[in-house]
Image (tube, rainbow, N blue to C red):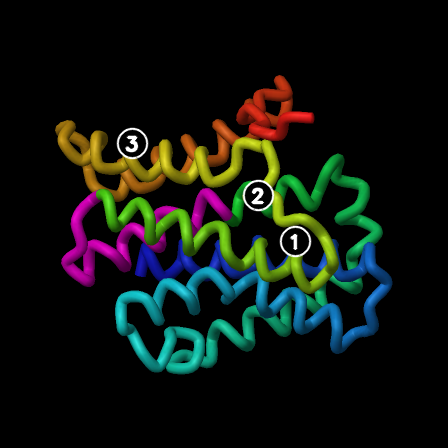
Amino acid sequence: MFYFTVDILGTIAFAISGVLVAMEKKLDFFGVLIIAFVTAIGGGTLRDLLIGNTPVVWMRDSVYMITIIITVILAILFVKQLKYLRKSLFLFDTIGIGLYTLVGIEKGLDAGLSPLMCIALGTITASFGGVIRDILCNEIPVIFRKEIYATACIIGGASYFILNQLPIAPNYAFVIAILIVIALRIIAVKFNIRLPNIYRS
C-alpha cells in the first residue's frame, strides 16, 4: 500500500506538470489531457515494457486513468492558483522524478534485477514521461540539456541501496532517497549547477 500510494502521488505530480506545459502551449482540453496522460504514464509504460510486465500497469488498474482525469480537471480549474506558486512546473516535475525514481527501482527489485539495472530502470521511469511531454510540445527535453535531472535520479537511486545497508527501516530508506532526488534537483537549479556542455564552436 505504501509503494502504491507513492506511485499515485507521482502520477498526480507528473500529470500536473503536463497540464502546466500544455496550457502554456494553449492546447485545447483534449490536448491538455493527452499531454498530462503521457507525462504521467510514459516512463512507467516504458519501464513495464522493458521488464516484460504486460499489460502495463495503467491498463490493468483503472485507478491510474481515473487519477489522471481528475487531476487534469482540478489543475485546469485551479490553474491560476497553481501559477501563483513560484516555478510550479519545476516544483511538480521535481516531486515527480523523486517519487518515480524509487517506484521504478522497486519494480526492478521485484523483477529480480541487479542494483545497477534497478537504478537505470528508476531513472527511465522518472525521466521519460517528461521526455515524451517535451517532444510533443516541441521543446528540447530537460534530460538532454545541461541541467541536473537524470543525475539526481541516479544519485538518489544509489543512495537507496546504500541506506538499505544501514540499520533503518526500508520505508525510511525509500522516503529519504526520494528526498535526496528532490533536494539535489532543487539545489542544482537554485545554485545553477549544470553538467558541462561538450559543444565546441
The percent coordinates of residue 94 (x first, y second) are 56, 41
Q: Amino acid at mark 1?
A: Ser
Magenta region includes residue 75: no
Q: Residue 144 has which mark?
A: 2
Residue density around tag 2, few if under 14, some if 14–19, many if 20 or more, within 10 Å: few
Q: Secondary structure at mark 3?
A: helix
Instruction: Name the residue carrying label 1.
Output: 17
**Who comes first in sequence, dot 2 or dot 1?**
1
Task: Indicate whether 190 appears above or below 106.
Answer: above
Lower position in the chain sequence, tag 1 or tag 3:
1
Judged from the image, the secondary structure of the residue bearing numbered disc 1 is helix
Picture coordinates of residue 101 (x, y %)? 39, 47
Q: Residue furthest top?
A: 191
Q: Position of residue 31 (x, y in %)?
A: 75, 73
- Compared with 194, 39 (above or below) is below
Classify residue 26 as left or right of residue 36: right
